Image: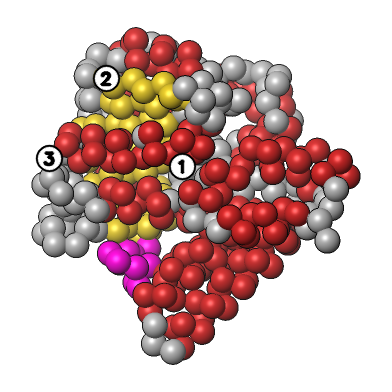
Amino acid sequence: MDIPQGSKDERVQSAISHWAPRFVINGVPLTDFQEVTAGIERWEDWCSAWSKRAALHEELGNKAHAEGFNLSAGEHWTRAGVCYHFGKFLFVNDMAQLKQANLKAVECRTKALPHLRPPGERVAIPYEGKHLYGNLRKPLGVAKPPIVVMCMGLDSAKEEMDDYENRFLKRGLATLAFDGPGQGEAEYDFAMCPEYEKPVGAVIDYLETREDLDVSRVGVWGVSLGGYYAPRAAAFEKRIKACVALSGAYERKPTFEGRPIINVEAFRVRSHSKDLDEASKVAARMTLKGFAKNIKCPIYIVAGTKDRLTSPDEARKLAAEVSGPCVLSIIEGGNHVVNNLWYRYRDQTADWMATQLGAERR
């Protein structure tokens, strides 16, 4: 039986109101979103409810794999991974539950990778004495493809990237979606890093050890907070030849006034801050002011006019300061990351990146 909307936790109501487009375009069946959220009254039940639904998809993958249907298994496991991910993505109020769901998301997507078309592999990237982990996929029929390094946001992780990856792969580009400091698998060992040129530099260093990729043609792509991280990296890392920034901040305010409480708490936890005063000092380091002028590679910037987290003015400031060629796409009616109008930018940015990196037009 559906729970009356008025009886739901404010955080659950906010989730239902704002997250459906993102969940669905990134791989959650619409019926799953409707059924799972209808059954959740308290935010404290969010992770367990999504993990239960994820387990259903995981078992479908196990069954398909046992019967020899490996393509189907990979698709079921990918769907399971994204459901586990959305169970944990902002659930910092219970870190034990969050980590368990995160481990399951990683397990499912890792099981899926060899069976996808094109397949992928899990890679470990040396970083500050430990490792960052990513999923590397290469397009079919391209001997030494250019590659797009994919930067996550505050609450996204590499297990959510299948749709974005496939759009690049179909256009002859390899992809490496990785969890950077404070993200996904790396949120436990590393605090968020406003100076994101450091992890991106480590990723490109790793790519240069491989002979199956054309590292003279590297693009960087970022979503949400990653929409700040990617241009930040491009301002310092000259091996980057093109950049896509989706709904990123030009300069993050050190205060958290007006931001959803679950996002604020996730920022505090993932910055490894003991309180909001300490977290505000991390936020104050997130700026492109004075640095964006160093972005000389081509850049494609996307923002939505109905974004409740980042104003389109942030995109305008970035576009005004960069030194290289710039495409600025401010989409009327677009929400955060314009997931509600994804067809206005996902294929377009993939086409643009393929052009910048010299991929064969398909």
Q: Which residue is mark 1?
A: 152
Q: Does residue 238 show up magenta in the picture?
A: no
Q: Which residue is mark 2?
A: 326
Q: Which quarter of the figure has residue 315?
A: top left
Task: Please indicate, yes or no, whether residue 320 appears anywhere in the rendered image.
Answer: yes
Secondary structure beneath label 2: strand
The label nearer to you, 1 versus 2, is 2
Give the alpha-carbon distance from disc 3 to disc 2, as whole Å: 17 Å
How crowded is the residue under tag 3: few (<14 C-alpha within 10 Å), some, or many (20+)? some
Question: x%, y% of residue 62?
Answer: 51, 81
Identified at 49% across, 70% down, the residue is 77
Tell me the amino acid under the disc marked 1.
Answer: Met
Q: Which residue is mark 3?
A: 358
Quarter that holds the N terminus: bottom right
The residues colored magenta run 113-122
- Say whether marks 3 and 2 touch (CB < 8 Å): no
Give the alpha-carbon distance from disc 1 to disc 2, as whole Å: 22 Å
Tell me the amino acid under the disc marked 2.
Answer: Cys
